[in-house]
């Protein structure tokens, strides 16, 4: 059970000039005393939002620091998808009561900010800034207001397009660049808070997406990950009216781009044209994240997921029929209200049928404003834990078998990590598998190399570089 976060934002305060995407060192622009500390919780969209926030602040002469003590501005980019994530913020804020009355500005950004609004000021009066994700481009004005003596400021727009563009986006991952193509969500899954925290669906014009993709390629990025809560529900608002599959093909055609990923896909809007695009365009990664949430049609109906188990498995069959093997991963929720042993059995049998290469499994957590919040027959926490373990155990065995079947194969890997031990490297294949491997080469970060797999575990492949 884990969330998908690829970058440790507060650990990376600058990029080496030799790395793709390197921008002027923050301190070159900085005004002494204007410092910020930024901590991020949650999904890739939040990680990317933090890159936008950091860009806005760096553009205003702020410098990023690594400790709360050293910062004038302390920001938390928050996640409210599950109750525990939201509670964590209040306990973090509790620790900053000691700064009440000091110069330091404490701010809450993101989904908890959007969800709780003024309530945050009431519960933690030392907080001075509350700003939701659609208002990040307004951060400079909000900070101006604070600097000119306003005690508290709030930005809680929900449906602006401004969220796509900030003055500068500071990229934290030197190898993979995130690019938001659709914001918000118009689905209404009964358990999910996202439509309330991120507002209605808004797609970005295809020309603007392509312009940013070209800018990223010029900055040296070769891998782009298109982001959206329901990325494949993309609807080009411009006269070009590109479909999602056409947009994928167009981004993949940008000179210099070697890999294009996208996440998260909603099963209902996942069509054959996407599979055909992956089949024909080698730059499109052979990986689809297609969350099912439950293997029981009865539970899916209660979740308002808009598909049945059978319809979902038809989508999987369509992906498996591709000429190129495509890796599929998923999200599962266990312990939804009223979930029976039979429903759990259906989820376990769906794991067998779908043969995922990875699963993020979560215990259901009731969220404010959602229809499931008031559903009867809540499942006790202990029982949710037992069901989660069942799902994870079954999936671990599936992954072990699937990964063992790859021993002997060779994958192209984009190297994104090294180890303290010389000659040890790691990276990801187009199918998003993690490969840990050995190589005699002294420097491989950012390189594409061929790696032959000689052993496997449920979560990674182990191999050596083919030279
Ligand atoms: N838009 C994506 C989709 O439709 O699959 C999911 C986005 S959501 C940020 C990521 C995952 O969090 C969901 O796929 C779901 O498994 C999980 N999740 C969302 N709400 C939840 C809740 N109330 N309790 C537990 N898990 C939840
Ligand atoms: Fe939440 Fe459902 Fe929208 Fe995904 S599709 S963000 S789970 S409401």
Image: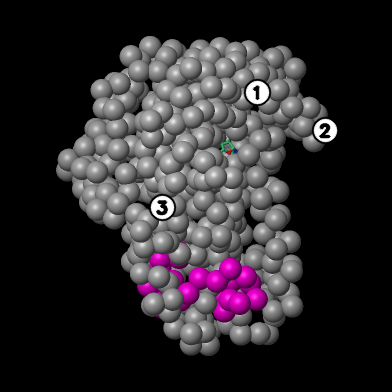
Residue at disc 1, secondary structure: helix
Return the residue found at the far left: 239
Quarter of the figure with the N terminus: top right
Q: Count every numbered label the image shows and give the total.
A: 3
* 61 relative position to 251: left or right: right
Residue at disc 3, secondary structure: loop
> In the rendered structure, which disc, 2 or 1, sits on the residue that comes first in sequence?
2
Q: Dot 2, crowdedness within 10 Å: few (<14), some or many (≥20)? A: few
* 204 relative position to 152: left or right: left
Quadrant hosting residue 29: bottom left
Residue 87 in percent (x, y) is at 71, 54
| Numbered circle sitting on residue 382 | 2
Task: Tell whether position 71 is magenta.
Answer: yes
| Numbered circle sitting on residue 127 | none
Q: Circles 1 and 3: CB distance less than 8 Å? A: no
- Which residue is disc 3 drawn over? 174
> What is the distance, in whole Å, between disc 1 and disc 3 at their CAs?
31 Å
Between 180 and 402, the residue placed more toward the observer is 402
> What is the distance, in whole Å, between disc 2 and disc 1 at their CAs?
21 Å
Give me the residue at 44% from left, 52% from top.
173
> In the rendered structure, which disc, 1 or 3, sits on the residue that comes first in sequence?
3
| Numbered circle sitting on residue 396 | 1
303 relative to 74, above or below? above
Return the residue found at the far front: 440
Q: Dot 3, crowdedness within 10 Å: few (<14), some or many (≥20)? A: many
Instruction: Please state which of the two labelled residues, at mark 1 or mark 3, is closer to the viewer.
Output: 3
Mark 3 near ligand 1 (CB under 8 Å)?
A: no
> In the rendered structure, which disc, 2 or 3, sits on the residue that comes first in sequence?
3
| Residue 265 visible here | no
Residue 152 in percent (x, y) is at 57, 77
What residue span does the magenta drawing correspond to?
53-75
């Amino acid at each position: 059970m884990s969330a998908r976060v690829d970058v440790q934002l507060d650990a990376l305060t600058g990029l080496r000039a030799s790395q793709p995407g390197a921008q002027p060192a923050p301190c070159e622009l900085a005004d002494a005393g204007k410092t910020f500390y930024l901590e991020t919780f949650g999904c890739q969209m939040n990680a990317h939002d933090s890159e936008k926030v950091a860009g806005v602040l760096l553009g205003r002469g702020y410098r990023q620091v690594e400790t709360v003590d050293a910062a004038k501005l302390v920001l938390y980019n928050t996640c409210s998808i599950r109750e525990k994530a939201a509670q964590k913020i209040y306990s973090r804020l509790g620790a900053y009561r000691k700064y009440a009355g000091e110069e330091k500005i404490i701010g809450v950004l993101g989904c908890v900010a959007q969800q709780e609004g003024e309530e945050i000021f009431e519960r933690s009066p030392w907080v001075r800034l509350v700003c939701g994700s659609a208002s990040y481009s307004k951060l400079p004005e909000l900070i101006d207001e604070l600097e000119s003596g306003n005690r508290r400021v709030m930005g809680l727009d929900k449906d602006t397009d401004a969220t796509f563009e900030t003055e500068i986006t500071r990229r934290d991952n030197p190898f993979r660049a995130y690019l938001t193509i659709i914001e918000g969500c118009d689905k209404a899954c009964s358990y999910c808070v996202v439509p309330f925290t991120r507002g209605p669906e808004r797609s970005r014009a295809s020309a603007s997406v392509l312009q940013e993709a070209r800018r990223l390629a010029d900055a040296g990025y070769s891998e782009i990950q298109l982001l959206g809560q329901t990325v494949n529900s993309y609807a080009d608002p411009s006269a070009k009216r590109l479909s999602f599959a056409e947009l994928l093909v167009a981004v993949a055609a940008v000179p210099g781009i070697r890999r294009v990923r996208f996440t998260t896909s909603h099963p209902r809007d996942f069509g054959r044209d996407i599979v055909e695009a992956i089949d024909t365009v080698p730059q499109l990664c052979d990986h689809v994240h297609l969350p099912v949430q439950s293997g029981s049609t009865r539970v899916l109906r209660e979740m308002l997921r808009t598909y049945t188990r059978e319809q979902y498995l038809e989508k999987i069959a369509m992906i498996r029929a591709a000429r190129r093997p495509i890796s599929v991963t998923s999200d599962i929720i266990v312990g939804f209200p009223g979930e029976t042993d039979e429903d759990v059995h259906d989820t376990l049998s769906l794991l067998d049928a779908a043969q995922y290469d990875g699963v993020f499994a979560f215990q259901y957590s009731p969220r404010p404003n959602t229809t499931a919040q008031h559903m009867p027959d809540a499942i006790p926490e202990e029982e949710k834990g037992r069901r989660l373990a069942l799902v994870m155990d079954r999936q671990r065995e599936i992954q072990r078998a699937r990964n063992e079947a790859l021993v002997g194969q060779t994958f192209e890997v984009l190297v994104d990590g090294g180890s303290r031990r010389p000659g040890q490297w790691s990276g990801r294949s187009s199918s998003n598998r993690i490969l840990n491997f050995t190589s005699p080469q002294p420097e491989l970060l950012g390189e594409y190399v061929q790696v032959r797999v000689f052993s496997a575990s449920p979560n990674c492949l182990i191999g050596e570089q083919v030279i």
